[in-house]
Image (cartoon, coloured by chain):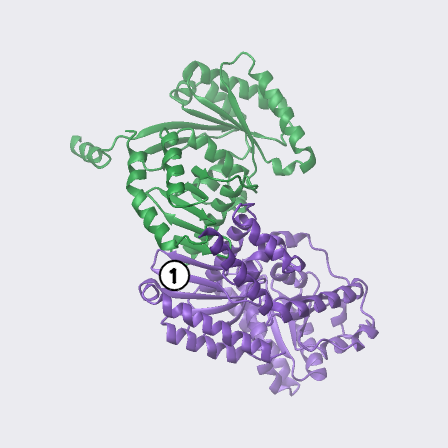
Chain colours: A purple, B green
Amino acid sequence: MDKHGLKETVHSYTKYAKDLGPYSSLNREEEQQKGSKGNLSESSLSALSLNTPVSAEKCNIALAGLTRSGKTSIHSVIFHKISPHETLFLESTGRIVKHVVSHSPFCQLELWDLPPEILQSDSESSPSLEDIVSTCSALLFILDTTTETPDETLQLLHQTIVRCYNVNPNIHMEVFIHKTDVLSDEQKLSFQREIQEHVDGELRDIGLEQVVSQVSYRLTSIFDHSIYEAFSKVIQKLNPHTSLLERLLDSFVGYSGIENAFLFDAVSKLVVATDSSPVHGNDFELCSDMIEVAIDISGIYSNWNHPNSNETIQEKNHNGVEEDPFPISSGYFFQDSQCCCTIRLGNGMILHMKCVGYYLCLVLMARGEILDSNWGLVGYNIRVFGDCLSKIIRSSR
Amino acid sequence: MDLPAMETDRIVSRPRSRRKVLLMGRSGAGKTSMRSIIFANYVPRETRRLGVTMDVEHSQIRFLGDLMLSLWDCGGQDVFLDSYLDAQRENIFSEVQLLIYVFDIMSTDVERDWYYFSRVVDCLRNSSAGAKIYCLFHKVDLVPEHQRQAVVEERKRRLKEALTDSLFSVECFATSIWDETLYKAWSFMICGLIPQLSKLDGALSKFCETCEGDEVVLFERATFLVISHATLHSHSDVHRFEKISNIVKRFKLSCNKNQSHFHSLELRNSQFLAIIENFTCYTCVLYVSYHPHVQSTAVKLNIQCAKTLFERILENEN
């Protein structure tokens, strides 16, 4: 009995690894690219490197803002899992640094961390802001609410928006009103209103009425979940498949009788898509905390040198999983298509998470009494959802 | 006057074993911080906001239902310490079951640390001879990692010297609020107060075998301190229970933000099945199995069935 079961596990794993084939090879290519471009990011980028074709699959995002506004902190917290409290010790970024993020197929980004000097209109840096922005699909302007020179900052924001629009009229512009954790809810809103009115007014004055709708404002802080929510919104905007995924999730939710469904990029815990029904308060945060719990516990027990599990581990290594860019413990987690986790809460809700491959996790919230009588249906629907997802991913290549 | 007293008597009719626990050490050693983390679900960095403890702060903590811990958090400024050793001596040191003495390992005034420690031990010997003593060398995270062991050994040696004429045996732990060591130490110290421990261990091993589990761990529900565990194969990570305590406590906090609370967890991947469920009124259980055919529903049913047995073990002491 025992042996048989084990073979089953190994067999299904091999099958999964085959499915993963093209993706993992792609991954390696990207790794190489990262390696070769890594040298460049060390020094200031030369104009030459800009001429090299940018990989079509990656979305370029420029991070701009005054010095110490929190640009490096933001991407360190989200993509490098640095604790928010450690970001205090990060040094200022004095040159242009490019960070390549290659997680799930919907989270393929190149982040350009820009030094503040480049924003000055008399800056002679090469490449200039214009050069970089022309290749970017989004500009994040990080606006520090604790700044001592608010007028100067607003002036710079306005200038930057105009300059970016002139080079790249299709660019998405996002203003992160950052470090809001110190403000009360009321203060946050009045802050946002003030900034928005100012920028809108200035844009109207110079006859750029149409740009107003192109700029979004988000209140963020790295000390709570708001930065994840804001960044999720940005990648959803940039992903051409978002509306398709949303429709898919909508029908999944409708047919399964559940409340909400989220598709997470498992590594960064950004939300790639959600269904269109309203999300209550901290549900996002709860779901991403749940993924963390599942990763942590898997990390503890997946490495157990257990007589029964030895064979599976060896088999895995044989399949080439050692090239996994993530540490062993979390690597198992993200690669394991059988991984699922269910958490029941005191108020009768159930959180259910299932890895659907490609470093993506589907998390759903449902009322206990409904889900418990529908597990078979929901399980089937998750499988169908997974199949559709792979079709979307394959078609986009 | 008599009537309300009688009524309260009836409400708390079940006799409880009350244990007096003294938490002592010099000012700034971290006594109140650790108490807040273990018993009040504080996140480590929140402890920075805690002020100085004035005199003695008493707290009654119900542990495992029947065990009442009466925790005396004794403020550590020299004025207070002198008064404990002098005027308040009778009050403080009588009927103590457990003394937890906290040293700040980075302290610069080492001589005075030892002076107070040996005086406290003397008083304790006179008033409550049967008390257990644990020493925590706290804030070890501040010692560079390669020196840590040497520094702790050195302190242990000093401790032995300080206790040459004493009958007490003292156990030591090196702790830090930033990792799992604090949980480990507290689990160990509190478990020593549970009289039914060996019975629990036995029952848990049997339960683990019956359910084809590889590991079963019993946690206290409110604090998530480890009470007992049954492990069939050795695991390389000795801090895993404390890590799980931390993971679950963190998740509980985020559930609280959502006006809800954590109920149970089931995690399955291609290697193992893990279940965390509420067990008896005051405990939670973690079950881990690597057996590919174990069904989670069957395990949950077994957990339900075992509940009565464990409830009886936990209660029968009184």
User: Which chain letter matches label 1?
Assistant: A
Q: Nearer the viewer, residue B288 or A101?
A: B288
**Image x and y of residue A128, in percent:** 78, 75
**Image x and y of residue B45, in percent:** 55, 46
Classify A2 as above or below B125: below
Is residue A274 visible to us here? no
Q: Nearer the viewer, residue B182 or B208?
A: B208
Q: Residue furthest top?
A: B165
- Tell me which residue sits at (52%, 29%) in the image: B76
Which quadrant of the structure image shows residue A147?
bottom right
- Tell me which residue sits at (45%, 55%) in the image: B267
Q: Is residue A155 left or right of residue A284?
A: right
Which quadrant of the structure image shows residue B285?
top left
**Image x and y of residue B282, in percent:** 34, 41
Q: Residues within 10 Å of mark 1 (few under 14, many from 20)?
A: many
Q: Nearer the viewer, residue B89 or A100?
A: A100
Q: Is residue B157 left or right of residue B79?
A: right
Classify B281 as above or below A338: above
Q: Nearer the viewer, residue A43 or A336?
A: A336
Q: Is residue A255 left or right of residue A93?
A: left
Which quadrant of the structure image shows residue A120?
bottom right
**Image x and y of residue B53, in percent:** 48, 34
Is residue A386 visible to us here? yes
SS for dot 1: strand
Amino acid on which the number 1 mark rests in the picture: Ile
The residue carrying mark 1 is: A350
